[in-house]
Image (cartoon, helix red, strand yellow):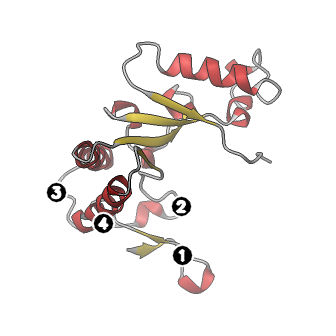
Amino acid sequence: TWLDNYANQGGRPWLNPYSKAAQDYNIALALECAQKGAALVVADSVQFPNTIGKELATYGDTGGKSRAQVLGEFVQRLDQALAGEQSRLAVATPGTVLLGQEGFDYLGEPGAYQCAIAVNIMPSFFAKQPSSSALAPVMNPGDTVATAVKGINEGGAKALIPYVQAYTDT
């Protein structure tokens, strides 16, 4: 683990996504959920830290793998482990990323994952997008969700689980 600030200044600990031990720990937690009967495990925050100074972070031996590669391989391992327990995996990601409206290098490439995607469709995200003005997203959250899911899954290739966060944006 490492901190994204000094501990006495509220630094948050992060697991190193390149660490097999960190990955195995998360897989063990997911397997425990599946073994207790969870039909679906949602992996949230499958990402690298997003903080000031993140470009200064080191991750040890990366084996020459990019951030997107290591996150993708972790998701594949987690998905395979859960399939062996008759459980499904969904990885949470913002809908705006899947629509190509925003890019966050710390998230890897969630659109390439073969598992289900739990799509965070917060209407206020779409209010910031110029192409969303006709939807009036905050006033029509149902239409926003339906339009976003349709746009994300035009080919119908993967299972999408849309959700709207239960808090408002500033």
Rounded to the nearest angstrom, the CA distance separating label 4 from label 1 is 23 Å
Q: Which residue is mark 2?
A: 51
Above or below, 116 relative to 85: above
Judge left or right: residue 154 versus residue 83: right
**Mark 4 is on which residue type?**
Tyr
Relative depth, front residue between 138 and 32: 32
Q: Are marks 1 and 2 in contact (CB under 8 Å)?
A: yes
Query: What residue type is disc 3 on?
Result: Gly
Can you name the residue that lies furthest to the bottom here? Answer: 8
Q: Amino acid at mark 1?
A: Asn
Q: Are marks 3 and 1 in contact (CB under 8 Å)?
A: no
Query: Closer to the N terminus: mark 3 or mark 2?
Result: 2
Q: CA distance from mark 3 to mark 1?
A: 26 Å
Element type at mark 1:
loop
Q: Which residue is mark 1?
A: 5
Residue 25 disc label: 4
Label 1 vs 2, first from the N-terminus: 1
What amino acid type should be assigned to the residue bearing mark 2?
Thr
Q: Looking at the image, is mark 4 or mark 2 nearer the viewer?
A: 4
Local SS, label 2: loop
Q: Which residue is mark 3?
A: 63
